[in-house]
Amino acid sequence: PIGGPLGFSVAGVAAHPITGELFGVDSIADVLVTINPTTGIATEVGPLGGGAAFANVTGLAFDPSGQTLYGVENGNDQFVTIDTTTGAATGVGSPFTVGGLVVTAICCDPATGDLFGGDAAGVNVSQLVSIDPATGVGSAIGPVGFILLEGLAFATQVPEHSGLFLFLIATVAPLARLRDESFVKLRCPEGQS
């Protein structure tokens, strides 16, 4: 912990791309929180609402402008937008529009606004998916070689390479390890940042 316990069961975190403010979602209490990066203390913004439809939001990502906070609910495979002033979530598309995938993590390309998700397919190998932010529909890009994919993030500057890389976290030992045992770097597919 940075300076103290969060006080919440935070399952997804996203930093506002303009202000740097940290937002998280408590997947047990189903509330949006802000997180103080100095103290590590979380403060409730408000309930996600939606009852069982939004009961397990586990991934968050902002669009590049910071105007939209996206989330994924992996029980109903529902893609949502979340109001950062009230915490209220709104479904995009209908449940299972994420393609019936178990998307547990999302990230947004800061240069293009393209959304990517991690399909944690249980005992099968997880896959990277693209998500249409207007419809919530997910499309498989391909397997990542890990199971239980739980975190995604973009980095625009990777010292040993040029270009944009996608970082991911998996909770189960990977089939193959690259450099760091916690993170893996994937080159985004041709035609996608």
Image (tube, rainbow, N blue to C red):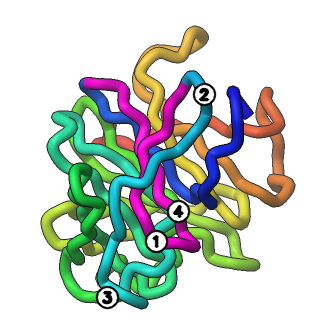
Say above or below: 72 vs 15. Answer: below
**Gap in angstroms between the C-alphas marked 4 and 1:** 5 Å
The label on residue 30 is 1
x, y percent for residue 22? 43, 37
Left or right: residue 184 compared with residue 94: right
**Kind of residue at disc 1:** Asp
Q: Badge 4 is on which residue?
A: 26
Disc 4 element: strand
x, y percent for residue 165? 48, 31
**Kind of residue at disc 4:** Asp
**Kind of residue at disc 3:** Pro
Between tags 3 and 4, which lies in front?
4
Lower position in the chain sequence, tag 3 or tag 4: 4
Between tags 2 and 4, which lies in front?
2
Magenta part of the protein: which range? 19-37
Left or right: residue 113 compared with residue 146: left
x, y percent for residue 149? 64, 60
Q: In the picture, which quadrant includes the C terminus? A: top left
Disc 1 element: loop
Q: Badge 3 is on which residue?
A: 95
Q: Badge 2 is on which residue?
A: 39
Lower position in the chain sequence, tag 2 or tag 4: 4
Q: In the picture, which quadrant includes the N terminus? A: top right
